[in-house]
Amino acid sequence: MSIQSELIRSFRPILQSLTPEAESYLGMIRRAGDDKFGDYQANFAMPLAKKLGKKPRDVAEEIANAWTNFDLCPKPEVAGPGFLNIRINNAWLEKSVQTQLTDERLSVPAVEKPRTIVIDYSAPNVAKPMHVGHIRSTSIGDALYKILKFLGHNVISDNHLGDWGTQFGMIIWGYRRFLNPEAYQANPVAELTRIYRLVRQLVDEKKTVKEAVGSRQEAVDSPDGDLLVGDAVLMETSKLHHGDEENIALWKQIMQSCYKEIDKVYSRLKVRFDYTLGESSYQPQLEPLVESMIASGLAQVSEGAVVVFNPEISEAPFLIRKRDGAFIYGTTDLATLEYRKAHFHPDAVLYVVDSRQALHFQQLFRTWRRMDPANENVELKHVSFGTVMGDDGKPFKTRSGDTVGLESLLDEAESAAWKVVEQSQACQSMTEEQRRDVARKVGIGALKYADLSQNRDSDYVFSYEKMLAMNGNTATYMQYAYARVRSIFDKGGIDVEAFRNSNPAIVLTQPAERALVIELSRFEEALLSAVSDYRPNQLTSYLFELAARYSTFFERCPVLKAESEEAKTTRLALCDLTARTIQKGLELLGIETVERM
């Protein structure tokens, strides 16, 4: 149990004796901003005093005098107008470290009341290459999945692929007319993207079929020759949606090629999903869903389309069926929520999608809640995020102006990391294969961490140089910190497993030792903070602070050359715990560690 959790447990009955709203005040227990004031501070006496009609300092004194957990700390000190300063006992810290040392979970307990949480993230359109924007959704979603699962929740990841709709009408129509078989064989997704862009251009230019295909098609004199490409595409889309055998067969063939390309990217990122249920999975439910919404009066026909009005959110209605009878992703999202409710019985559904979709999710959530009063019991959260920017302050693009492909981004990250590895003395004795593996872990880790270390709502500027820096809040720095701690055991010829299982006695004598232990005890606190509003940067900030505390400890407290065996044992234990905490923290962020760097 963390210090904060123990403090909450101890203060709870005291506050409950003063107010029925005790829980709302317990969140005001915080890590002290300055060590001279203690280890933790509690500021709830001041707002509580207003409720009680008393002076804040008198309320603080009353709370301090009721303190009983003297194993944890002495009576809290009342300071200023009513602050409570708390300094944890060394004996409690020493015992805490010994418990952490042999606990696989680093003394982080599973939650008492697990929730079932569905997380929808990544969600690329399958017939297009994944791009730089997908790194944010994928990294944030995967980190939240891992952290929530580690805390003991029942977590379900679902990759809601864009595998249906008009885009496939375009691809099917263009595939039959413009396919380059050799290019398709070499890189299916790239060729399908080329076809999609070509057909999209023809639609936008309002070209007829005859104008579009020209001499490349024998049947230019067919009845369809004067048809607009846009109308021809809609016909192919309608045939697909109504189960036309040829279109379904071609769609399945295209999907197989696309899945292989997408899986290659996920394999490199070490990301997996419990379910991959794309838009196509819900098509049979769309018509009956819309009809039931019309029958209930929730949806109505407006100018030929079917819409839901949510005036408290927007004057614009929520469109669920177009005039031509086509369904859109809003319809599919409603059907998906219905499926998840029926099959997963979630307490929460999280959508890790960029901030530009904010209005869509407001409309979606409000509409779904209106469909059934019981839906109010499910937490719906748009875990929004900002844009990856270039040095010019605009969305990150290639020199030609195209969106940066995710695979090329991974290639560049590994290439940049290889230069770092080549310069590392610790890696010189490795084989090239081993060094390449280190470069992979460092490069992809840097890419993920650069994203996760940002406040997710913020845009951030992409820079390989900054993300691979050996100092500052980067994955490279954290991986190096881990490797440096591990090297101590190698230098000392110490079997870390045997040492850990020997139940070493911990005696804290130096301020730097104590400060490191305080930080190590905050791991649970950091994880709970990261999931309180679904912000992984709370965990990256903690890991960076832990690494900084360790650096100070290492400078001031010799380990292998400690002044006594007692001090050496204590410091080895702190080194081991630091390495394990960094490793577990990075693992929960989807980032691998390296033993030498």
Image (tube, grey):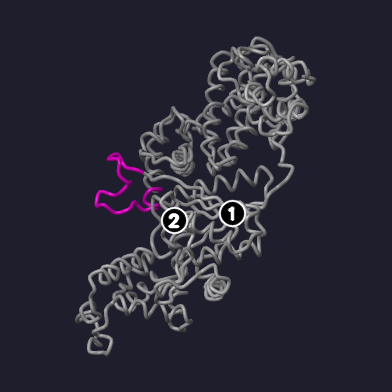
User: Which residue is pictured at 45% across the width and 46% down the height?
Assistant: 385
Q: Is residue 338 above or below residue 71?
A: below
- Whether residue 376 can be seen here: yes
Q: How many marks?
A: 2
Q: Are marks 2 and 1 in contact (CB under 8 Å)?
A: no
Q: Name the foreground residue: 239 vs 517.
A: 239
Q: Is residue 339 above or below residue 393?
A: below
Name of the residue lying farthest toward the front: 53
Disc 1: which residue: 349
Query: What is the x, y in percent for residue 493?
Result: 63, 25
Query: What is the x, y in percent for residue 434?
Result: 49, 41
Kindly identify the amino acid type of the residue bearing the numbered disc 1: Val
Kindly identify the amino acid type of the residue bearing the numbered disc 2: Ser
Q: Mark 1 Cα within 10 Å, few/some/many (few <14, many 20+)?
A: many
Tell me the quarter of the picture where residue 503 sits: top right
Q: Which residues are magenta?
A: 389-410
Disc 2: which residue: 314
Direction from residue 375 to residue 7 in the image, left or right: right
Q: Name the foreground residue: 458 vs 560.
A: 458
